[in-house]
Image (cartoon, rainbow, N blue to C red):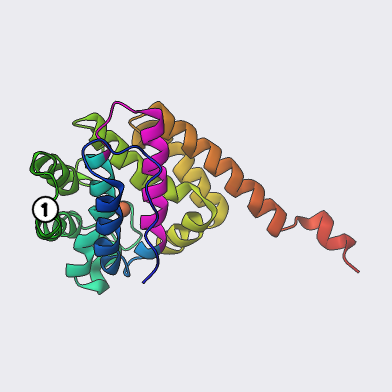
């Protein structure tokens, strides 16, 4: 098991140790649907968004992002990609709902085991229970931050490679697809700004690793 990173964010309602413990308890549920890559990235993006929104409840955001997709561990693996909106094989909203509902049950168990502050448990479970099915709207600042942090990995180099594989799209088509989604996917200005920044970097890295025609011709 990897070492849990200590949150850089000042957590007013919960201690950094509690977040680190939750990270370790959530991690075993990430090894499906590239969660082992998606979750640490989403967690880092949530921390970045919290720095832009110090008024948000960090204890709510960090727990919700660490646990938001744990429900996939209880959804048949062969159906996982049908829980992806715009999936080429057809999107099945029931799969999306199922991972949210299973996620709420699992999250409740994990938070209870840790004696997570009771006042935060309700808001955390509400966010997990609608993070995809109500992605078009944000019901609180914490919900907005979790939804934005969840989407941001699709704009980075690794997320692009993984997600475009799921969607059966080329690099160019997938990056154009996510770029067009920025105005509707993101609920915070910082989320949209980070999406553009991250996408620019992914495109730059792609150009560097996939040299164009001219450079090929120069190769002896
Ligand atoms: Fe999800
Ligand atoms: Fe997610």
- Would you place residue 89 above or below residue 153 in this image? below
- Would you place residue 144 above or below residue 73 in this image? above
Q: Label 1: how many residues lie within 10 Å, few (<14), some (14-19) or many (20+)?
A: few
Quadrant assignment, res 13: top left
Which residues make up the magenta segment? 37-58
Residue 75 shows in the view? no
* Residue located at (43% from left, 30% from top): 190
Label 1 sits on residue:
115
Quadrant where the image shows the N terminus = bottom left
Give left or right: position of 129 versus 197.
left
Give left or right: position of 6 versus 67.
right
Residue 140: give x, y in percent of width and height: 20, 30
Residue 112: give x, y in percent of width and height: 9, 56
Quadrant where the image shows the C terminus = bottom right
- Would you place residue 149 above or below residue 210 in this image? above
Closer to us: 64 or 22: 22
Determine the secondary structure under disc 1: loop
């Amino acid at each position: 098991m990897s070492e849990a990173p200590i949150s850089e964010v000042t957590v007013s309602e919960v201690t950094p140790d509690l977040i680190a413990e939750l990270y370790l308890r959530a991690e075993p549920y990430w090894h499906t649907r590239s969660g082992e890559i998606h979750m640490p990235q989403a967690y880092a993006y949530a921390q970045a968004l919290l720095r832009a929104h110090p008024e948000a409840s960090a204890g709510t955001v960090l727990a919700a992002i660490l646990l938001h997709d744990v429900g996939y561990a209880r959804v048949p693996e062969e159906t996982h990609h049908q829980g992806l909106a715009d999936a080429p094989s057809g999107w099945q909203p029931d799969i999306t709902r199922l991972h949210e509902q299973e996620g709420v049950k699992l999250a409740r168990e994990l938070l209870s085991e840790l004696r997570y502050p009771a006042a935060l448990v309700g808001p955390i479970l509400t966010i997990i229970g609608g993070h995809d099915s109500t992605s078009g709207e944000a019901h609180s600042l914490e919900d907005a931050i979790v939804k934005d942090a969840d989407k941001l990995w699709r704009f980075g180099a690794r997320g692009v490679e993984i997600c475009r594989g799921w969607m059966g799209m080329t690099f160019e088509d997938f990056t154009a697809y996510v770029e067009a989604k920025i105005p509707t996917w993101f609920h915070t200005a910082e989320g949209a700004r980070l999406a553009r920044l991250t996408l620019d970097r992914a495109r730059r890295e792609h150009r560097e690793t996939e040299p164009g025609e001219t450079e090929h011709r120069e190769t002896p």
